[in-house]
Image (cartoon, grey):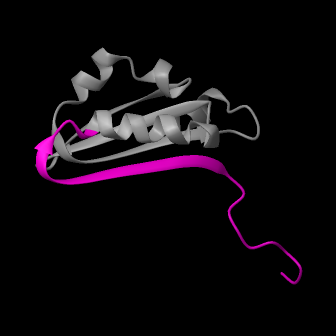
Amino acid sequence: MWGEERHLHEECGVFGVCSPKEQDVASLTYYGLFALQHRGQESAGIVVNDRGVFSTCCDVGLVSEVFPPQRLEALGQGNIAVGHATYYKRKPNEKQTKSIHD
């Protein structure tokens, strides 16, 4: 343990929105992730909470590729959303990608 670095070694971007009223939090999260995309350019995901009902969308690709307007609309309205943009140091295998996005 002596001399070892003690911090995370992953690169990713995480962005969240919490609103007092129901609104298009998915789009707000999208723009936050777009600004953070330099932190992770290989996959992205957003989850929206609408009164306890969760809608999610995630896939491999740049933020703009993963979230065309139709996908953002499909996430619906809500008051809370969290998104991530991920960078892999090594190429993930199919099982790793599936567990990240399921």
Question: Residue 85, position in %: x, y?
Answer: 53, 39
Of the pair 59 and 14, the residue shown nearer to us: 14
**Residue at x 68% of width, y 62% of height:** 8
Can you tell which quarter of the image residue 6 is in?
bottom right
- In the depicted structure, whether residue 49 falls above or below residue 44: below
Q: Nearer the viewer, residue 56 or 68?
A: 68
Q: Is residue 13 above or below residue 44?
A: below
Can residue 101 be seen in this snapshot? no
7 shown above or below 36? below
Query: Residue 85: in sight, yes or no?
Result: yes
Image coordinates of residue 23 in percent, x first then y, are 15, 40
Q: List x then y, in percent, for residue 51.
A: 10, 49
- x and y percentages locating residue 1 in the rendered image: 83, 81
Indicate yes or no whether the magenta region holds residue 14. yes
Q: Is 29 left, or right, of 60 in this rendering?
A: left
Left/right placement of residue 59 relative to residue 81 reads right
Q: Which residues are the magenta region?
A: 1-25
Q: In the shown orientation, is residue 85 left or right of residue 16?
A: right
